[in-house]
């Protein structure tokens, strides 16, 4: 039995590995930054819900969340003129957050927002939707 050690087989493996590395780099460029920003947003929502009085208005809670986001310079991503843009001014708006209160004990938030990234090689936009639920600690 002869083993397959042809130059074509070796080059095919090398090509496959190169493609896998390129795909990994592009995926890292596109998906990792907004995923990291999402962690910061979750943390800001959790921190605020844990500390804000349950009787605070929705506007006040959103303002406090946004103060945290701005203080830690959370990234906001969008695509414009076929270019990727980043701002360190992520802010939540009323249409992104729905609050629920358990009497005067606890406040919870359902958060939904998007970040937009450009896939460099394909010059395509990827809209990444994030949704999560956070329960504040009971008071």
Image: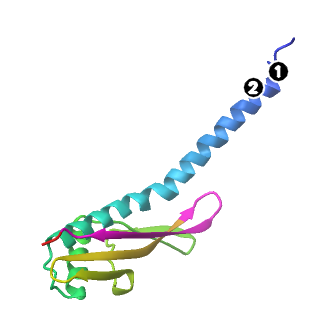
- Dividing the picture into quadrants, the one containing residue 43 is bottom left
In the rendered image, residue 72, in percent from the top left (x then y), is placed at 24, 64
Number of other residues with Cα within 10 Å of mark 1, as a class: few under 14, some 14 to 19, many 20 or more:
few
Q: Is residue 12 above or below residue 38?
A: above
The mark found on residue 6 in the picture is 1
Kind of element beneath mark 2? helix
In the rendered image, residue 29, in percent from the top left (x then y), is placed at 50, 54
Front-lying residue, 135 or 6: 135
Say whether residue 116 is left or right of residue 42. Answer: right
- Dividing the picture into quadrants, the one containing residue 67 is bottom left
Say whether residue 89 is left or right of residue 54. Answer: right
Q: Is residue 56 magenta?
A: no
* Numbered label tally: 2
Front-lying residue, 57 or 92: 57
Q: Main secondary structure of the magenta part?
A: strand
- The N terminus lies in quadrant: top right
Marks 2/1 in contact by CB < 8 Å: the verdict is: yes
Q: Which residue is mark 2?
A: 10
Q: Residue at x 34, y 60 (%)?
A: 39
Say whether residue 68 is left or right of residue 15. Answer: left
The mark found on residue 101 in the picture is none
Q: Is residue 80 above or below residue 75?
A: below
Q: Is residue 2 above or below residue 64?
A: above
Looking at the rendering, the stretch of residues picked out in magenta corresponds to: 118-137
Q: Is residue 113 above or below residue 118?
A: below
Q: Residue at x 43, y 75 (%)?
A: 113
Judged from this view, the residue extending furthest toward the right is 1
Front-lying residue, 96 or 10: 96
- Dividing the picture into quadrants, the one containing residue 44 is bottom left
- The C terminus lies in quadrant: bottom left
């Amino acid at each position: 039995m002869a083993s397959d050690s042809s130059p074509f087989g070796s080059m095919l493996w090398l090509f496959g590995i190169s493609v896998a590395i390129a795909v990994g780099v592009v995926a890292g460029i596109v998906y990792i930054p907004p995923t990291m920003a999402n962690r910061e947003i979750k943390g800001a929502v959790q921190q605020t819900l844990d500390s804000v009085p349950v009787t605070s208005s929705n506007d006040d809670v959103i303002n406090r969340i946004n103060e945290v986001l701005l203080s830690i310079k959370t990234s906001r991503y969008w695509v414009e003129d076929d270019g990727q843009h980043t701002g360190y001014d992520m802010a939540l708006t009323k249409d992104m957050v729905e609050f629920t209160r358990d009497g005067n004990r606890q406040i919870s938030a359902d958060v939904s927002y998007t970040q937009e990234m450009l896939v460099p090689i394909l010059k395509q936009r990827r809209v990444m939707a994030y949704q999560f639920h956070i329960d504040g600690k009971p008071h």
